[in-house]
Image: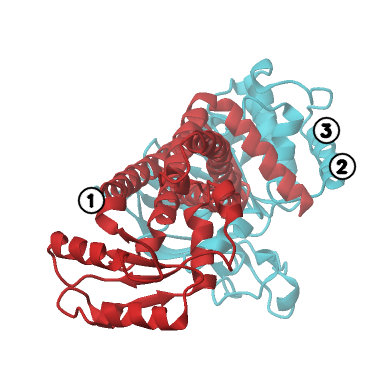
Chain colours: A cyan, B red
Amino acid sequence: MNLWRGTCGGAGLNLNNGKGFTGAPCGTTCIARLCYFMIRLENVSKMYGNETPAVRDASFDIAKGEFVFLVGPSGSGKSTLLRLINRQERPERGNVWVAGKNINEMANTQIPFLRRGMGNVFQDYKLLPNKTVFENVAFALEVIGKPKHVIGQQVPQVLELVGLSGKEDRFPHQLSGGEQQRVSIARAFVNRPLILLADEPTGNLDPATGEGIMALLEAINKTGTTVVMATHDHRVVNAMRRRVIQLDRGVIVRDQERGVY
Amino acid sequence: MIKRISYAFRETIASFRRNVTLSVAAIITSAVSLLLVGATFLIQRAFDNLLVQWRGDVGMIVFVRPDVTPEALTFIEENLKSQPNVIDVGKIAYLDKAGSYEEAKRVFAGDPTTLSLLSVETIPSQFKVVPKTTDPELVRSLATQYRTLPGVAGVSLAEDEFDVISTLSGFVRTVTIAMSLVLLAVAVILIWNTIRTAIFARRREIEVMKLVGATDWFIRVPFILEGLIQGLVGAIVSCGGLWTLNKAWTSGVAEFKAGTGVSSLVVPGSYVNGVMIALLIIGAVAGGVGSGVASSKFLDV
């Protein structure tokens, strides 16, 4: 079963919306109808309890291969947006489309297959402390049932990509913060996802190390992976000059190409 | 597929190691409760052996000599039917030699010496009589009268034989069933709690598994397996206990004098085996269900 090879949904086909056009077909069955947008939010609102909404009436499209920053102060709804995209949360109102599928209408049994096309990177890395670097990355492939020979091939490749060759047998506590984040990126990318969601990936790192992580995310983006990164790190946003979506108390206040913080 | 199965077993064993104390507690509780369930079955069966003769409110048994003439047999039956005030005439039942021999096999289950002396040819046949009256003296006087009839080998009265045992059997049965049910519930709750603890200990891992796209069942199966194995191991322990218990009981009963009735309280091996299989199934199902509920509730997958 592969959700990422389905037909295009009704949304994501707006050919006159010029922004971010890549012309890439989203799957084998819809070559004639080009699927534009990897991610589309339509008037999405999310509330936690009865308090003010975490996200209010958010709409945007993210094209395949784009690199997007979600910026804003703590509590402005950046993380919630990411959690809506990988369906850790469901919105009260509005629709979230990923690769042409309305993921709010998706059955729970389909969610694991949706997530196999996404990588997640976190501020606190979320590595498993009792597993080595190799095992942490291999784990992502093991739990989706990849055969051993595939794991033995793909894990060293991705570890080389993130610059951790030779440290396969270290445990997370034997690595620096930057190295741990590289392991987490390797784990997110080892399955070659179409989307990489990063929540404050440089939040715990010093500027120089953060730059290294950003270079890595950029390299991953160049392979065609759509990257959505939540951050409040001015320096990385200003240095990269990519699309910036700014949030303030759950509302999108700015959506700018090649923006700064 | 084999890879998945071996993964599930590896995880199950690892989780057991992480949680030895709780797992052992769950196993012991399920073992004790299942042992009680099994003992209840055996006790019931043992008393049934003793009471098999007296099923259906039979209050008096008239044993007929095996060499009785047909005329004498008819005479006895007519004598019984002539007492409609004391005896429920409609319920008089005649158990012929073959039937009596089948019954004797259970009555003398623990007394092979006596049983070997009996055969279908030499065994007395019997009339089972249900008294109508509640006055035991009336039945007793009738019994005295029947003993003198030609062809009658003897008359047994229910109240002489088993009144105490019958009452005791009902009481023991109720108590053991209640206790075993309570303990079984405790075992399920303990297994449930063990699984909850195991899930809590691995919540980071589970979070990562969910985010990289592991299916719910892939995450759940090792936990369900863990509970199922706990229940099953508990059941195996209880089977061992039950076997030992029955062995001790059988040899204890054998020391009683034959003919005291106690020797009937022996449970045949085939029945014990059946009970053991039932215990294994109950243990596995209880453990599997307990952990299945816990994993669905706490994984929130």
Question: Which amino acid does the dot numbered 3 rest on?
Answer: Glu
**Label 3 CA crowd tier, 10 Å (few <14, some 14–19, many 20+):** some
Position of B194 with respect to A7 (left or right) is: left
Q: Is residue A77 above or below residue B194?
A: below
Q: Give the SS element for disc 3.
A: helix
Mark-to-mark CA distance, 2 and 3: 11 Å
Q: Which type of secondary structure does the marked residue at label 1 adopt?
A: loop
Q: Counting residues from the N terminus, which is met first, the one under dot 1 or under dot 3?
A: 1
Q: Which residue is mark 3?
A: A160
What residue is pinned by disc 1? A50
* Residue beneath the point at 66% across and 22% down: A172
Q: Residue tagged by mark 2?
A: A153
Closer to us: A42 or B220: B220
Three-letter code for the amino acid on which mark 2 is drawn: Gln
Q: Camera-side residue: A97 or B205?
A: B205
Q: Are marks 2 and 3 in contact (CB under 8 Å)?
A: no
How far apart in space, not on screen, are marks 1 and 3 (Cα)? Answer: 47 Å
Q: Are marks 1 and 2 on the same chain?
A: yes
Is A146 above or below relative to B190? below
Residue A175 visible in the displayed image: yes
User: Which mark sits nearer the N-terminus, 2 or 3?
Assistant: 2
How many residues crowd mark 2 within 10 Å: few (<14), some (14–19), many (20+)?
Answer: few
Foreground: disc 1 or disc 2: 2
Left or right: B298 in relation to B129: right
Expressed as whole percent of the image width and height from the top left, the position of residue A224 reads: 74, 53
Q: Along the line of sight, which residue is nearer the eye, A240 or A199? A: A199
Mark 1 near mark 2, Cβ–Cβ under 8 Å? no
Q: Label 1 vs label 2: CA separation?
A: 49 Å
- Give me the residue at 73% from left, 32% from top: A135
